[in-house]
Amino acid sequence: MNRIEIRELTKDHGPRRVVDHLTFDVLPGRVTGFLGPNGAGKSTTMRLILGLDRPTAGSAVIAGRRFTDLRTPLREVGALLDPQAPHPGRRARDHLLALAVSNGIPASRVDAVLEQAGIAAVARRRIGTFSLGMRQRLGIAAALLGDPGILLLDEPTNGLDPEGIIWIRELMRGLAAEGRTVFVSSHLMAESASFVDHLVVLGQGRLLADTPLQEFIDARSTPRVRLRTAEPERLAAALAREGLRMAAAEDGRWTVDGAQAERIGALAAREGVAVLELSDERASLEQAYLDLTADRSPFSATAA
Ligand SMILES: Nc1ncnc2c1ncn2[C@@H]1O[C@H](COP(=O)(O)OP(=O)(O)OP(=O)(O)O)[C@@H](O)[C@H]1O
């Protein structure tokens, strides 16, 4: 039941199509990253899932129903959308307490989530005095309040310091390990790679990829070997006979595209060329993502 089902979801704002026939599922037990350049339509999709916007066409079903038909929404779905939303004059604890009371959630949960979000010490301070990072933590505390099976987090790492980012990474991984559905948006691929199992990538409102993280990397990056040798000319000649090209890299090292270390090592051994260093280069997820989304971003000049 803890799944999100998106079918042909479409949203127009005036003449502009912001979300374009999206179809995908978000499944429990893993962290699904919702990625795309600025303006791709991620926040709009989340708003549609949460019933804050009406779709032009298509549907978003969460925990088996439309969000607006859920009887106790906070107990089924926790969401972090806009950390600036809570009233600045309210004290953090009072804000959570009001949410709890209006949703039939026991007050004891308030202290539990304040603790879990690492803001118990500032619980009696007014929200207006909070930094963006503290507001993000408060937003996450609110999302966790009803102990929901599904979490939707829009750019939760915004404003967090490195320690905060590690904290949220561990939190999301822990929630997924408990069997919950975690759907988290970001426009930063490199950062997301450390906590995401599965990727849904959006570009100009359209679905570009719906795939496990590792498959995404493997499918979009050519293998590359980095090596050091005392006899570059001989090795280059031997590689050329196999249709491979050796290119000079920094610090006197060389790279070979389109091959793996195993093949280059065997070839060098056959030729009797001494290889001093040989390794497969890790494919860059960031590059794969930029390649995929480059021409789908309204700001592609900067994205590329
Ligand atoms: N109420 C609205 N009226 C008109 N256009 C809108 C409205 N809401 C969003 N848009 C436009 O829809 C597009 C998608 O916006 P959205 O906020 O969903 O993107 P996003 O992927 O979440 O981007 P970001 O990473 O910058 O948050 C943007 O071009 C935005 O300007």
Image: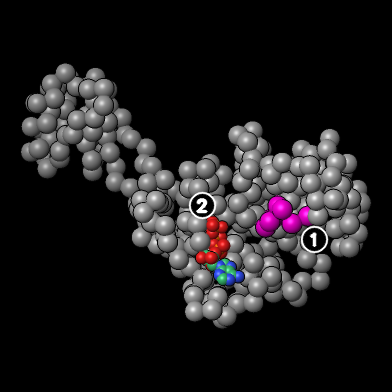
Q: Which residues are magenta?
A: 80-86
Type of amino acid at the residue the image marks with label 2 = His
Give x and y (percent) for residue 242: 11, 40
The Cα atoms of the two marked residues, 2 and 1, are separated by 28 Å
**SS label for mark 1:** helix
Query: Is residue 82 part of the magenta span, yes or no?
Result: yes
Bin the neighbour count of mark 2 within 10 Å (Cα to Cα): few under 14, some 14-19, many 20 and up. Answer: some
- Residue 187 tag number: 2
Query: Is residue 94 part of the magenta span, yes or no?
Result: no
Q: Main secondary structure of the magenta part?
A: loop
Instruction: Determine which residue is flagged by label 1.
Output: 75
Residue 258, quarter of the rendered image:
top left
Type of amino acid at the residue the image marks with label 1 = Arg
The image quadrant in which ligand 1 is located: bottom right
Q: State whether residue 82 appears in this view.
A: yes
Q: Is mark 2 within 8 Å of ligand 1?
A: yes
Residue 76 placement, left or right of 166: right
Q: Is residue 73 above or below residue 231?
A: below
**Residue 68 or 131: which is nearer the viewer?**
131
Mark 2 or mark 1: name the one nearer the start of the chain: 1
**SS label for mark 2:** loop
Q: Is residue 51 above or below residue 27?
A: below
